[in-house]
Amino acid sequence: MKYLVLLAILVQIASARALKITRSMSKSPKSPKTPKTPKSPKSSPKKETDPMLQFLSHNDSLIVFGEEMLRHSANVNGNLEVDVTIHMIEADFILSKAAVTLTGVLANAEIHMYGQDPINFGGFNQTSPTYAIKTKKQEALIIGTNTGTSNILSYNGYPGRLNELNQKIFDTVLNSVVTKQEKKRYITKGRKLEFLPDTYIPIPPFWVRDSPLVVTHDDDVTYISSPFTMSISSKYVIPTPERFQGAYYGKPITAAQAYEWIVYDAFGNADTFYSII
């Protein structure tokens, strides 16, 4: 929950300093009306200058997001510190090692992130990138922090699922980030977004490049399923290089993507969605 709490606090600060000022300045006299033409959500010019969307897309926000992603997926008890690395080059991300180390009774785990294409909703794309994430899976974290006499980390139930994290992030943005007016507009007029169980992708290298978030639609709701995969924790079952053993890969939604949907994308023309149902 650290990410969700910090997100709410940081948003309040950002709002006080920039968001209210920008929005008050945007209320200029309207120009003469011209005939409207159908637009898809991506055509809105506000996204490019929206200070809240820029704030949620900043590396500082993404680092806190990466920390929460690791803690959620691992779901362990114990003293765990998280190091986040955001990669700009795909090859660096693929070859990165999500190590886990011990310093006394403190466990240190690494998580690697790589920005990819935005979510493709069929009729349009978002502007905020999707982040591929690599870390250690629950089993590997616990094995890697076993001192021989005790476990620094222990199980706290099943590993966290991405659809659960997606829902928490979405609810936090809806209830603590957007304005009351934006929340009311989404609830009363917006197309709803729901999160289906995660989609397992069997081959990690293909997952990195060729497995976007899975998007489907029905008449009233758009659904997202996050892809994920894991590598084995032993080189003896299936030959696996040491640096790739015990890894967990996933693609959750970010707060920026949830914000885009709630404030902008949920109000596209019906044809944008119906054409691909």
Image: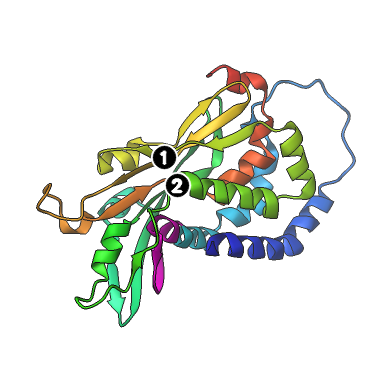
Q: Say what secondary structure mark 1 lies in.
A: loop
Q: Is residue 268 visible?
A: yes
The answer to whether 91 is drawn above or below residue 85 in the figure is above
Image point (24%, 65%), residue name: 143
Residue 192 on the magenta span: no
Q: Nearer the viewer, residue 66 or 236?
A: 236
The answer to whether 273 is drawn above or below residue 135 in the figure is above
- Give amino acid for label 1: Asp
Q: Is 138 situated left or right of 218 in this image?
A: left
- Which region of the structure is painted magenta? 69-86
Q: Is 43 situated left or right of 231 in this image?
A: right
Q: Which mark is residue 22?
A: none
Residue identifier under label 2:
162
Residue identifier under label 1:
198
Q: Is residue 43 visible?
A: no
Q: Quadrant of residue 31?
A: top right
Mark 1 crowdedness (10 Å alpha carbons): few <14, some 14-19, many ≥20 = many
Q: Nearer the viewer, residue 265 or 245?
A: 245
Report x, y in % for residue 260.
62, 42
Q: Say what secondary structure mark 2 lies in.
A: helix
Mark 2 crowdedness (10 Å alpha carbons): few <14, some 14-19, many ≥20 = many
Q: Quadrant of residue 242?
A: bottom left
Query: Looking at the image, do the residues carrying marks 1 and 2 touch, with CB atoms under 8 Å apart?
Result: yes
Q: Earlier in the sequence, mark 1 or mark 2?
A: 2
Report x, y in % for residue 17.
74, 64
Image point (74%, 32%), residue name: 189
Report x, y in % for residue 68.
48, 60
Q: Nearer the viewer, residue 106 or 54?
A: 106
Disc 1/disc 2 C-alpha distance (Å): 6 Å
Image point (71%, 50%), residue name: 178
Report x, y in % for residue 188.
76, 34
The answer to whether 61 is drawn above or below residue 79 in the figure is above
